[in-house]
Image (cartoon, rainbow, N blue to C red):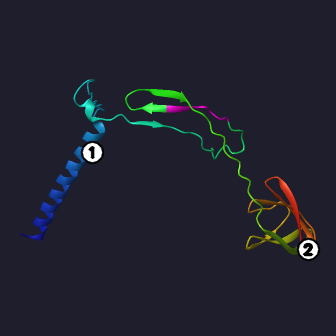
């Protein structure tokens, strides 16, 4: 066989394959939507093979998008069953136990002040980590209220304390 004849046969084969693919694509997009519904009659032997799936939804988690808004607590939870609709039952809300966090160990090391600006930087150790802080900064749950040469005032969970050198 000559090269010209081989190329002609190859081109005809490729065109046939692509034509077949194009027909399948047209059939797929032009087909009418058909919905297939499998119905198992009640009291049939197949019904005993399937277990009903039930679950409870406990929606008592904090919404991350509504942190600043007041939370409305619900006394109801939805109970879904696979075979029927939803059943709403009343549940008791458990009040969380308030845990008071202890103050972390804080040590005020000193003050740095730039000659160009009036803002002061305080050097504090919280636990084993050193931090440079300004008034209004939040570090490890602490809010820095004021910084002087010998003292720093810190707010932690609404409680204010002063720490000296």
Identify the image quadrant of residue 25: top left
Under circle 2, the secondary element is: loop
Q: Which residue: 11% across, 66% down? A: 6
> Does the magenta run of residues contain 136?
no
Which residue is denoted by mark 2 in the rendering? 116
Count of residue discs: 2
Q: Is residue 10 left or right of residue 29?
A: left
Magenta-drawn segment: 72-78
Q: Position of residue 136 (x, y in %)?
A: 83, 60
Identify the image quadrant of residue 154: bottom right
Q: Tell me which label, 2 or 1, sits earlier in the chain.
A: 1
> Does the magenta run of residues contain 75?
yes
Along the line of sight, the residue nearer the viewer: 9 or 137: 137
Quarter of the image that includes the C terminus: bottom right
Q: Is residue 130 left or right of residue 161?
A: left
Along the line of sight, the residue nearer the viewer: 102 or 66: 102
Q: Is residue 90 left or right of residue 120?
A: left
| Tag nearer the camera, 2 or 1 | 2
Q: What distance separates the C-alpha of mark 2 from that of mark 1?
A: 73 Å
Q: Which mark is residue 108?
A: none
Q: Position of residue 159 (x, y in %)?
A: 84, 55
Label 2 neighbour load within 10 Å: few <14, some 14-19, many 20+ = few
Q: Position of residue 99 (x, y in %)?
A: 71, 52
* 83 in relation to 127, above or below: above
* 59 in relation to 1, above or below: above
Label 1 neighbour load within 10 Å: few <14, some 14-19, many 20+ = few
Which residue is denoted by mark 1 in the rendering? 25
Q: Which residue: 52% across, 27% down? A: 88
């Amino acid at each position: 066989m000559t090269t010209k004849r081989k190329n002609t046969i190859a081109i005809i084969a490729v065109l046939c394959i692509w034509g077949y693919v194009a027909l399948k694509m047209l059939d797929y997009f032009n087909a009418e939507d058909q919905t297939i519904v499998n119905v198992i009659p009640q009291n049939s032997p197949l019904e005993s093979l399937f277990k009903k799936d039930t679950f409870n939804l406990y929606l008592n988690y904090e919404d991350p998008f509504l942190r600043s808004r007041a939370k409305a607590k619900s006394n109801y939870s939805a109970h879904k069953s696979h075979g029927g609709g939803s059943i709403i039952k009343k549940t008791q809300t458990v009040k969380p136990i308030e845990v008071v966090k202890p103050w972390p160990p804080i040590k005020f090391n000193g003050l740095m002040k730039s000659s160009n600006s009036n803002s002061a930087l305080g050097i504090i150790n919280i636990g084993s980590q050193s931090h440079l802080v300004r008034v209004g900064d939040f570090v490890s749950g602490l809010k820095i209220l004021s910084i002087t040469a010998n003292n720093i005032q810190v707010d932690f969970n609404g409680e204010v304390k002063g720490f000296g050198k």
